[in-house]
Image (cartoon, helix red, strand yellow):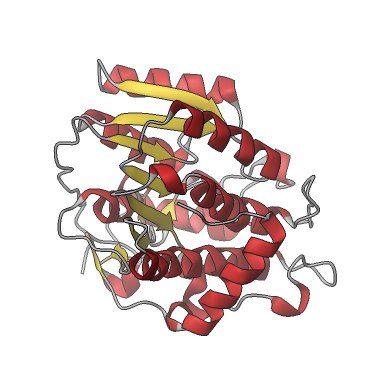
Amino acid sequence: MPRTPVDITVPDLSGTRALVTGASDGVGLIVAERLARAGADVLMPVRNRAKGIAAADRIRAAAPGATLDVRELDLASQASVRRLATELLAEGRPLDLLINNAGVMTPPERRVTEDGFELQLATNHLGHFALVGRLLPLLRGARVTTQSSVAVRRAAVHWDDLQWQQGYDAQKAYASSKLAVSLFGLHLDRLSRERGWGLASNVSHPGISATNLLASQPAMGRAEDTRAVRVIRWLATSRLPFAQTAAEGALPALYAATDPRAEGGRFYGPGGFQHASGAPAEQKPYPPLTDVAEAERVWAVSGELTGVKWTP
């Protein structure tokens, strides 16, 4: 069946404070704008401050009077995560929503961060793990939504070589990092219930969306879009049900983070054909997401690598 464009109503968020990683571009920018238009005070921690300020200006143009706070954060740097968390903890203002959205996708050559971590693992997972852990005292009563990917459908965490030092595979490294952060997002809800942390955590994914993660991104070593990327971009603007726009891809995260019917420990994505497009809905987690022992292992190893102690 032809695809029908979809949207959702974001409830009134006046008086709430939301933090969105990766809010300077793509799906994150759309999420931040929708939250601001609904009345939330939106915290936008970004790696490139000039780009973040430009994004905030764009949001204010669409939502006059929006309350936006651009901060600096490089999720690939544990020191940067620690600095931002220290700032926010010192300010002491609670967070109501935290959306772990930022990501890096398939740099063609292996890249290593200042901490010695493979870039995708560092940015997509370890940075978010450390950020949420360090901000835990501000998250009582909050909802945390972590952005997953259809890539985790048949993924596995690459335990044999977590940093991809032997035989880097860009696609598998991406899928491994997204599976790790998704397992983290679901396990966070289990531990919150067990330990009384007072937050709810769920996971969403954007389906097959023409986001800026698919752009050529010369800084990531891609001089031009691949044929697959061009096909996805074309499908996103067609009426075929195999892909959707970035604005539509933002809806599952918005639903998971703000809709009163969304719950912790659940998995949300597009409700259409093969969960590639369509209105956001709860869906059965992909099989790799249901392995509790694997989630516990991800949690333990991530704690060792980042040194983050989860104390409310």
- Left or right placement of residue 160 versus residue 228 in this view: right
Give the answer, above or below, for where 228 lies relative to 158.
Answer: above
Query: Measuring 45% from the left and 36% from the top, which residue is drawn there?
Result: 23
- Residue 55: x and y, percent? 45, 25
Where residue 167 sits, quadrant-wise, is: bottom right
Give the answer, above or below, for where 149 lies relative to 245.
Answer: below
Where residue 12 sits, quadrant-wise, is: top left
Question: Nearest the camera: 11 or 86?
Answer: 86
From where the camera sits, is residue 77 visible? no
Question: Nearest the camera: 86 or 115?
Answer: 86
Residue that sits furthest to the right in the current view = 166
- Residue 5: x and y, percent? 21, 51
Give the answer, above or below, for where 227 lies relative to 225.
Answer: below
- Left or right placement of residue 253 versus residue 73 in this view: left
- Residue 225: x and y, percent? 61, 49
Give the answer, above or below, for where 141 lies relative to 292.
Answer: above
Viewport quadrant of the N terminus: bottom left
- Residue 232: x and y, percent? 46, 57
Query: Measuring 53% from the left and 69% from the top, which residue is drawn there?
Result: 179
